Image (cartoon, helix red, strand yellow):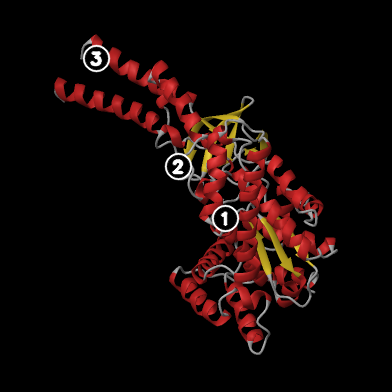
Amino acid sequence: MKKGTMTLTALLACVTLAGSALAFGLGDAIGGAAKVWEKKDAVVKAGKAIRKGTQDLTPSEEHFIGRSVAATILARYKRLNDPKRTDYVNRVGLYLTRFSDRPETFGGYHFLLLDAPNEVNAFAAPGGFIFVTSGLLAKVKSEEELAAVLAHEIAHVTLRHGLEAIKSSNLTSAFTIIGTEAVKEYSGSQLASLTEAFSGSIDDIVNKMVMSGYSQSQEFDADAEAMAIAFRAGYDPAGLTGFLTSLRDAAKGAPDTGFFKTHPPAGERLTKATSVAKQKKLTGAAAPARDKRFGGYKL
Amino acid sequence: MNKSFWTVCGALLATAAVAWAASTVTVSVKQTSVRSDRQFFAPTVATAKYQDKLAVSGQKGDWYEVTVNGKKGYVHASAVGGGAGKKEGSSIFDDDSKEPGKEDVALAGKGFNPQVEKEYKSKNPKLDFAAVDAMEKITVSDAALATFASQGNLSPKGGN
């Protein structure tokens, strides 16, 4: 190798090595005082007006929104006093969260059974507060089907469907107040305005979850993600199609309430889910051990 | 190659090494486990809390290699991510302003926080926050989840 070529090769190697470290995020070490000032300025800006949409809510803000949505759900429904089944649902659900795109949220995922035997329904509040009615638990026929339902609700959290229900007027109002104040404690008028925006945001989410339901595309996306989560976790993704088949059959002549009111027709979801499973090769098999285990918790 | 060439190379590499060592992520969840391996059911070697800054020595997939209290381990990107709406792990140091968790540092405690919840609660006394507090206390340990998976013959095909 000629001397010039060696020099060029060595220089390129040095630059590449140094560059890769810098690309890993380290501009701070090089720029001295000027960079420090830029960083300080960036921190200030981050507290000001650059937040625009739901994607800019922090995990802790999502948590506090989720808590208030959950408190609203729990004011409408009584929790099912059944520690054994609640623990079982939490084990299935928490295991599944580890295979989602977002295994950790600010306060973690928590699952609760609601005492509503005549309603087949489930809700997912932002941050990971997930509710399943006793009517739905009675409807699932296996752990695979229960996993499918829980994975669908987890998907609503990871895909931020609850947060997306917040109207931009409420967000804009909140971000304007937050952005202009460099304090963590708010005074009277600021607190009143911020609470009003917060209240509006909670109403937006609850109305979407309980009354109007998510859009068809959001439900289809949650179904597709649910099958992917179940597949990665080792469950048979066909648990979803099995449950949707039961729902489709139950929907015939059923009153247009609860789940049937807020979700697209089960037949349409079944067609879409079957297609996604085939396209993405999401296959699996049930296991006698899980079927036997589920038998001990069946309502 | 002359001496000045190697001096330049050495300076570049030294700068890169210092920069690498200075890299951090900030915890954006209440608490997270630092694990001995890149998977959720690996043993916990340390615990990190909200707003802790962790020194990063590498990143692979959705996991950061970090050092906490002298112990090396791994944290998942979703525990140090930025906004709630972002796909965690997607903004890996591509520019300084997107350093994971950095936005939370500026916004920590601001916005929709306990003070706002308290005010909202006082205006809506019928909402059941006590039940939410009880719900948040429901947890299952990683060890119990691993046993649960094993007893159910669950064999993961991917994920974390």
Residue at 85% from the left image edge and 63% from the top image edge: A81
Which residue is nearer to you in this view: A169 or A80? A169
The residue singled out by tag 3 in the image is: B5
The subunit carrying tag 1 is: A
Question: Which mark, residue A5?
Answer: none
Say above or below: B58 vs A267. above
Residue A63, x across and y down, in percent:
65, 48
Residue type at the position of mark 1: Leu
> Disc 3 vs disc 1: Cβ atoms closer than 8 Å?
no
Question: Which mark, residue B91?
Answer: 2
Question: Which mark, residue A163?
Answer: 1
Both labels 3 and 1 in a single chain: no
Say above or below: A150 vs A163. below
Residue A160, x across and y down, in percent:
55, 56
Q: CA distance from mark 3 to mark 2?
A: 35 Å
Residue type at the position of mark 2: Ser
Residue at 58% from the left image edge and 61% from the top image edge: A156
Residue at 57% from the left image edge and 36% from the top image edge: B107
Q: Quadrant of the C terminus of chain A?
A: bottom right
Q: Is residue A66 left or right of residue A45?
A: right
Both labels 3 and 2 in a single chain: yes
Q: Residues within 10 Å of mark 3 (few under 14, many from 20)?
A: few
The subunit carrying tag 2 is: B
Foreground tag (2 vs 1): 1
